[in-house]
Image: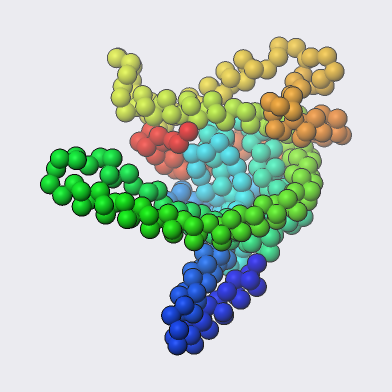
Amino acid sequence: MQLFTAWLVIVGLRLTVLGFRTFFQPVIGLLLLGLAFALRPRLGRLDPDAPTLREADAPAFFELLHRTADSAGVRRIEAIQFTADFSVSVIPYGFRRKRCLVLGLPLWASYPPQQRIAAMAQALGRSAPRNVRYGVVVGVTLGSLTAGVQALQPGAVPATSSRINPVSRGAAAVADGTQRFNARARKSEWLLWIPRTALAATARLLLWLTEPAARRALFEADDASARAASSPAALATLRDRRLARAISLELHRLAIEKRTIVKAGTPAVTQEDLWEIISAHAARLREQDMPQSPEPDSPRGVRRHSAGNDPDHLRIERLVHATQYPATITLDAPGRALVEDELQVPKRTVAQRVLRDGIQL
């Protein structure tokens, strides 16, 4: 893909610079250069608006991450960024492909301590070199294709003519101009459709070709999580992924309540106690959903999930019947308190943004 992008640049420059004897060659050259710009390699970068911690800012947390990365057999993390999403992932950034852990604080608040280690171990395991989708060649190519498809998406055609008062002065001229603008937009859409479709088809083909390797890497990440945090913690982490929607709704409700003060006489939620409220809400949801006693043929009280209801059912079933590991990475109470103290600043920052702006559902 990168060779194809370089070919587009070379041909586009030749047609643009050397083709001024005709009208069409420079136009085609500019189109090729525009396509090459849309397909340029994205090396990744840190979100400038997200709270970021380096090792000097949180030595205890980074020490935990380094132990987890060593257990998973992957490179260590250079930075941590915090978001309001119920997720945790590892992204490369910069020319040297440094690694950043993107940690969603709703997930951190919802999971018990050992499940947090399991979730981070799973994220680190998914970014292992054996997962080709995280590699330099395939990963950068997929990023370029995805960004190219997004860049070639047509803009929304404004429906201005329907809002024009037909008896107002100049209404006919405005309606006629809007009609011509919409016609030009439709022609542009036809021009963008061919490269957009080709890029999307290439991305889907690449995803299909790498699906077996990505699935194996996902299973290996689950094994790494079980070895690091224990098999029960890894299983519980997969099962609790379904709390994401309920936790997002609760965050949205708290943000609305903060802005509107619906309940008279009830103090508004503050950013200091937001994550404690989310943790308690997740515990209630977990108690309501978990069975009170182990079900038949379900080891350790793990409920079986149907393939139609739970996309992670294969991973859960595999871990249930795999070798059961004890925890090799744990944190005692003083260690957990030290980590939580290092997260106070990003917690306050993200909580302030959630209560001020809400979240996207």
Front in this rendered view, residue 1 or 267: 1
In the displayed structure, 78 sits above or below 71; it is below
Front in this rendered view, residue 274 or 158: 158
Residue at the image point whose x is 58% and y is 39% from the top: 87
Locate residue 310: give its quadrant: top right
In the shown orientation, is residue 138 left or right of residue 25?
Answer: right
In the displayed structure, 289 sits above or below 82; it is above
State the image coordinates of residue 40 (x, y, percent, origin top left): 55, 67
In the displayed structure, 49 sits above or below 227; it is below
Locate the N terminus by quadrant: bottom right
State the image coordinates of residue 200 (x, y, percent, origin top left): 61, 54
Work out which residue is located at the far left of the displayed protein and give it: 169
State the image coordinates of residue 21 (x, y, percent, origin top left): 45, 88
Residue at the image point whose x is 20% and y is 48% from the top: 172
Judge whether residue 30 can be spotted in this image: yes
Coloured how?
Answer: rainbow
State the image coordinates of residue 97 (x, y, percent, origin top left): 62, 63
Residue at the image point whose x is 56% and y is 65% from the top: 39
Q: How many marks?
A: 0
